[in-house]
Image (cartoon, rainbow, N blue to C red):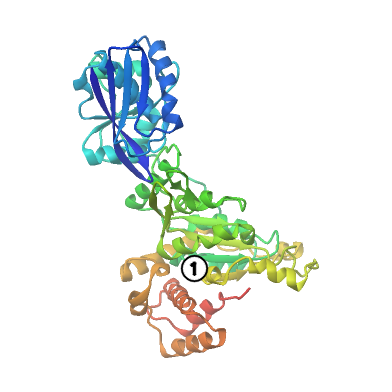
Amino acid sequence: MLAQVRSYTLFGLDAVPVTVEVDVSPGLPSYALVGLPDKAVEESRERVRAALKNSGFPYPQARVVVNLAPAELRKEGSHFDLPIALGLLAAQGVVPLEGLAGLAVAGELGLDGTLRPVPGAVNLALGALGEGKRLLLPLESAKEAALVEGVEVYGVENLLQAVSYLRGEEEPRRVEPDDPVAALEALDLRDVKGQAKAKRALEIAAAGYHHLLMVGSPGSGKTMLARRLPFLLPPLSQEAALEVSRIHSAAGQILKGLVRTPPFRAPHHTVSYAGLIGGGAIPKPGEVSLAHRGVLFLDEFPEFSRDALEALRQPLEDGVVTVSRARASLTFPARFLLVAAMNPCPCGWYGDPERACTCTPASRQRYVGRISGPLLDRFDLVVEVPRLTPAELARAPEGESTEAVRERVLKARERMLARQGRPNGELAGRALREHVRLNQGAEALLQAAAKKMLLSARSYDRLLRVARTVADLMASERVEEAHVAEALAYRKSL
C-alpha cells in the first residue's frame, strides 16, 4: 500500500512543502530512502524502526521505499522521523489514510517513541497556514508554532499518542497560543559613572538607529554602555516580533514566546565568516540576521577577520544579507544597529592619563588600518570613551536613568515616524533632502565642515541624519546650527 504524509523542509526562513511517500510492497525485506536526504534524514531509518518496535507497532518485513518529494530539493533535519513512521503505519493499515488528510506533520523520534522538539516551528506553522493545513508537532514545538495566529496546531508527546489521535481514539489536543512577555530586568545607565558624551551618543544612536563606534582604553565602560542600548530602543511591533521570531526559530532556538524585545547579539571576535554572515550547504541565518531589529555588538572590532568585517558593508546599507552557495542563494533580513568597540592601539593605553602606551606609531597605524575606510565611513557616530581614574569615579555624579533617557528616545522616534514613517538612520536620497530642513546658519556650518573634513557623499548624508535626530530629541522642527555642531562632534577620525 502507498501512503502520503505532508511535511516541510526549511529553506532559509521558508518552510517548503515536502510530501513523504511510503510504499510497502511484497519482496525481500529492504529499506530505500530517496529524495536527496542529508545524513540526519538517512539515520531516521534506525530511529523509526526502534520507535515502532518499542511502541508496540509492527515494522514491515517487506520491501519499503520512502521518497521525499520533490526529489531535486535537498532535505535536512531529524523532523522527518514522525512523518516517515506514520507513513509506514498508514501503509500497513494501522493508521487510516483519511486521518492524514489535511494534516502536516514534523517531529524527531526517540528510540522509545517519545517525541523531541524540532527547530523552526514558527516557520513550519507559517508553511501550514499558507497551505490551509492543520499541524501535528511534538508538544514543546507545538507551543512555539501556536504563536502564529490562524493555524490549528496539535501537540503530542509520543508516537502512541499520535496514532491514537489519527485513529480517533483520543480527542486531539489543540495547543492554544501562549505568548508570555519576558520581563527582562533593564540594565540602568546610572550604573555607568561619568561618560556623559558616550551616553549622549548612545541616546542619539537609539533614537535615530545610527551605527556607533566607541574608542577607549580597557575598562573605560564601552561594553557596559553597549549592553544598555537595547533597553533604550522601542519594543518590537507584532509584525517585527514575528519576523524576528522566524529568524531565531530557523536558527534552531526553541522559543517560549515571540521575541518582543530588540535582540542583542555579541559574537566573539573569533567568529567565522559563516557564523557572522550566515552559511552552510543550505544557508542558515548568521549573527547579523539574529540581530535583526536589534543590536549587533562587536567588541575588539579590529580583531575580527577582514573578510567578515567587509561583508558587513552590504547589510549595513541594504538591511539584508545574501548568502550564495552552489545549491542555493538565499536572502535574510539583517537590519541591525551596529555598535563596535575598540582600543586606541594594540596595547590599549594610547592617550591614557596614567598608563604609558608601549606601541610604536607604525603599530598603531597598522592596528587602526585593519578597519577599512569604507567600513569606517558607515558609522554615523564615533565617540571617545576615556578611562576614569578611581578618584574621578568617586567624584562622578549619578547620571540619568535608562527610563528617563528611553522616554526622550520614544518621543523622538514618534516624531520621526509621524513625519516620514521610519527612523532617521534609514533616510536616503530624496526623502533625506525633503525631511532634513536646515536653517541658513546650519547650512553654512555644514558646508564649511564638509570642505574642511573632506567628507564623502556618504559621510555628508550620515551627518545630516544625525543632525536631524539631534533636532528631534530637542523637539525642533528645523535643523539648527547647534544640532549640526553636535553631530560634527561625533565625526572623530581615527
The residue closer to the viewer here, 188 or 107, is 107
Name the image quarter holding residue 397: bottom right
User: Which residue position is annotated with label 1?
Assistant: 204
Q: Residue 294, position in %: x, y?
A: 46, 55
Q: Residue at x 39, y 48 (%)?
A: 328
Q: State which quarter of the image contains the N terminus.
A: top left
Q: Residue furthest front?
A: 28
In the rendered image, is residue 351 in sight? Answer: no
Q: Identify which amino acid the numbered label 1 is placed on.
A: Ile
Q: Residue 271, position in %: x, y?
A: 58, 50
Q: Is residue 47 left or right of residue 349?
A: left
Name the image quarter holding residue 369: bottom right
Q: State which quarter of the image contains the C terminus.
A: bottom right
Q: Residue furthest left?
A: 98
The vertical placement of 461 against 347, above or below, is below
Q: Residue 256, position in %: x, y?
A: 42, 37
* Count of marks, rendered view: 1
Q: Is residue 230 left or right of residue 7?
A: right
